[in-house]
Image (cartoon, grey):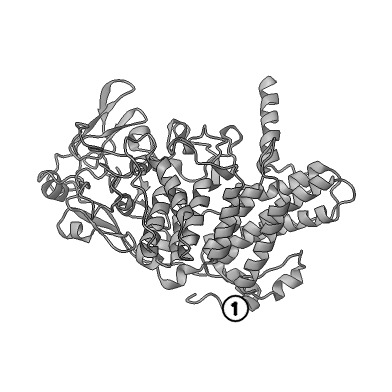
Amino acid sequence: MKKNKYIVAISVVLFSIVSCTELDLVPLDTPTTSPFVSTQQFREGLNEGYRHVFWIEDDSDNGIDDDKQVRTSLDRIKAGTLTAEDGTVANNWSVAYKAISRILSVKKQIENQNGVLSDNEINTFLGEANFLIASNWAYLITHFGDVPFYESQLSVEETFEMSRTDKATILQKVYAYYDIAISNLPVSYSGYQYATKGAALAMKARTALYMGDFETAAQAAKDCMDLGVYELHPDFSELFSATTRNSKEHVFTLPRNEELNIVRGDRIRWYMPRNHGGWGGQGPTWALLASFECIDGLPIDESPLFDPQNPFKNRDPRCAKTIIPFGSLEEGDGLLPRDGSNFLGIEFNPHPEKKEVMNFNTGELTRNNDSRSIGAFAPFNGLLWNKGVEETWKNPFRPDPNRMIMRYADVLLMYAEAKIELNQIDASVLNAMNQVRDRAYANSGHSNPTITTTNQAELRYKIRNERRAEFAFEKLRYMDLIRWRIAEKAITGFHYGLADVAANADVNIAPTGPLMDNVVTPGLWFWGLTPELDEDGIADFNPLVAAGMAKVLAETNFPERQYLYPIPIEETLLSPNLLPNNPGY
């Protein structure tokens, strides 16, 4: 009985934050005209907008950007096969409009409340409603372009007659919604946490940046910074732990709780090493590994410090904190390219000759299921994620770290990028970038190679690469590629991986094949050559393939039409006024 009371109490607390409950006092699956008669009903109604499903992520199981890959599998985005019949696009469209409709109905209730709420509650609740409405319209215009727009509930007949509104017009409405939220929302809460003034400013800045409105982005980000309530978490790795629930870096997060079945929804077992009971199939790309600077601030194809046989050595500290490292990491550590590292108590080492690895928990050697010479489905490119992965991810593979929608590092880098694009480069721009980099290098034994240049082109390269290093595995890369208009280059190409370990199908036989003959035996493990990077920081691994040191796992393609999603075909069939569809569909 005590246990049941405990669970109920926790449920009430969490539902009051994210409303992941079917016990709404007034059903909100459709717009309701029944008057709310208590503060709790208004609270529950607004909580609908905090459901995880209403905060759509730019990701998929197979990955939609150039930072993540899954063996030889491709998402329809990276295969270049996106069409108006796509189910995921249709679902995202439906989810965004459902969220808007639900919160519009709550907003109407707030505006028409009859003495139920205090003036302060009215203002705060209206602020939240406007924040939630703005964020969903922002998703629609940044992903679909021109879309049907409305600000009050529609009849069924009206929905069939709607046409698309220009995204620039909707953008101004989004700004207006955010501005109401900014005016009405508190800077912080003393109890349960909801959308704040800082969250509204930051999300306004993100929307403006996505839409190329750098003036608005810079000002909104600056206003968020000037609130003086946010700061960078001192430890980059710790920030992504399930135990870090209330960091000052958190601008807007959604809570999770394993006991209440609110956990990460992606396929966690895919991320974990096979030696930890995972599948080791979903990991970083070689392109991401190549993108991290060396500790002298130079890219790998320019730095004398880069060692292709020890690709984690002398790199930006975020490299080894994002991807599980192996080999030597710095001068004098006594490690060789064939050495692994201690990852959650078991050595991670993809080297083909390392058929056994150390279990540091037991002090005994164990079968190395993360080596291609042992397991046919060991990591195809030798890389797995480190960032945020911890013991809580294992058994039963249901991690519950808070979901970060916006953190302060993003605010700083958005401000810097917007000012760079405006060519308004001053000390504040360099300071914003170097704050993020200083935190990255903290306690690493190395100093941040401070950014000092004021050249716009050089800073544009720096800020874009900085975002990639800082936000890898946080599902922001895709929209960065879209808004920079380099998705065609970054996503079109190949996924690369290790050359075949053996000359025959039985990988458990002592191998003799391309990986051994062309890489390991000549002493060229891990990369036989240093890949060159182009002006956008995109690495070329084709010379390794040509030399038999690597192989192509999949060919990727991003046609120009995919810079916008298509209007779902079922929507255009019901409402022909939505045609023509976006170009190319």
Front residue of 133 and 69: 133
Q: Position of residue 63 (x, y in %)?
A: 42, 54
Q: Position of residue 241 (x, y in %)?
A: 48, 35
Secondary structure at badge 1 equals loop
Q: Residue at x 57, y 49 (%)?
A: 225
- In this rendering, position of residue 365 left or right of residue 410: left
Callout 1: 10 Å neighbours few (<14), some, many (20+)?
Answer: some
Quadrant in the picture for residue 139: bottom right
Q: Is residue 453 above or below residue 1?
A: below
Q: Position of residue 585 (x, y in %)?
A: 49, 75
Seen from this angle, which residue lies furthest front?
427
Q: Position of residue 26 (x, y in %)?
A: 79, 48
Quadrant in the picture for residue 10: top right
Asked if residue 54 shows in the view, the reply is yes
Q: Residue at x 36, y 57 (%)?
A: 453
Front residue of 170 and 198: 198
Q: Amino acid at mark 1?
A: Leu
All told, the count of numbered labels is: 1
Asked if residue 102 shows in the view, the reply is no
Front residue of 120 and 520: 120
Q: Residue at x 33, y 33 (%)?
A: 275
The residue indicated by pointer 1 is 579
- In this rendering, position of residue 539 left or right of residue 400: left
Q: Is residue 124 above or below residue 31?
A: above
Q: Which quadrant of the figure contains the N terminus?
A: top right
